[in-house]
Image (cartoon, rainbow, N blue to C red):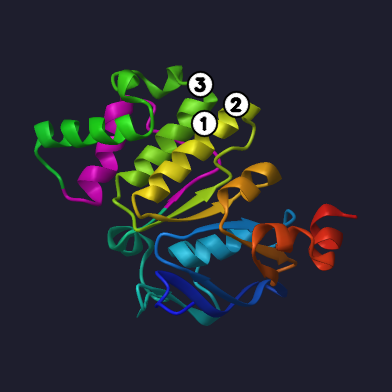
Amino acid sequence: MSEIPILSSRGLVKRFGGFTALNGIDFDLGAGERVGLIGPNGSGKSTFVNCLTGALRPEEGSVAFSGADITGMAAWKRAHAGLARSFQIPRPFRGLTVRQNIGVPLAFIRGLTDQTELDARSDDILGKVGLRDKAGFSPKSLSQVDLRKLELGRALAAQPRVLIADEAMAGLSDSEVDEILDLLIELNKSGIGIILIEHIMRAVIRFSQRIVVFVAGAKIADGDPREVMQHPEVVRAYLGQ
């Protein structure tokens, strides 16, 4: 990669007691790039993301964002810098409206205090994720696919330069998977680099410009999606064939 990556890790190691969850991970995400991160359960994907976003501290190695070392930076400061994530299981504030759920990160991360501006910015984000007509609803009334859209909207409120989408399509129907895929691709067109962690292979292949494969805490492949999926080690370790 010729330009400085927007997000990178070098030699990342994370241990839990005697178990090595990550073993020397080197990774680069280019500005505006779409990367799929795949691997069997227990391969280290979530641990890796937690180290990138600051939820966990690695024992060895470093994480950089826009060329600056952020290894010791708190998670909330990384969010302020433009590194956002969505979670596999949405946990909205159920006592707030859909609009107010977007307003929370706008106020906390972006520092907005004027209610009129908060509502306007919230509605703009809800329009981008297809929930504008449900702004006044309670999250309790939303479908699973709309909850995923709200989760992405809350991440988008941080005005990220990088978004890590953790299994945003798990449990959705084929048509709902396509809805979320289309949404992520549109967000990427606005310049946001995206790391997609997903087990639905057709979604990963359609979305990704590059695929990275983890197995047992190690990166075993990194490259063109179709070439990676034909790699013998990936077929054996990930697909079980």
User: Disc 2 residue type?
Assistant: Ser
User: Disc 1 residue type?
Assistant: Glu
Of pointers 3 and 1, the one earlier in the residue sequence:
3
108 horizontally vs 225: left or right? left
Residue in the image at 24% along x and 34% along y: 124
The residue wearing badge 3 is: 143
Residue in the image at 37% along x and 38% along y: 153
Q: Position of residue 77 (x, y in %)?
A: 30, 63
Q: Is residue 78 magenta?
A: no
The residue wearing badge 1 is: 179
Q: Would you identify the image quadrant in which residue 31 lies?
A: bottom left
User: Disc 3 residue type?
Assistant: Ser
Q: Position of residue 62 (x, y in %)?
A: 48, 80
Of pointers 2 and 3, the one earlier in the residue sequence:
3
Up/down of 115 relative to 15, above or below: above
Q: Nearer the viewer, mark 3 or mark 1?
A: 1
The residue wearing badge 2 is: 175
Magenta-drawn segment: 85-111
Q: Would you identify the image quadrant in which residue 228 lies?
A: bottom right
Up/down of 232 relative to 87, above or below: below
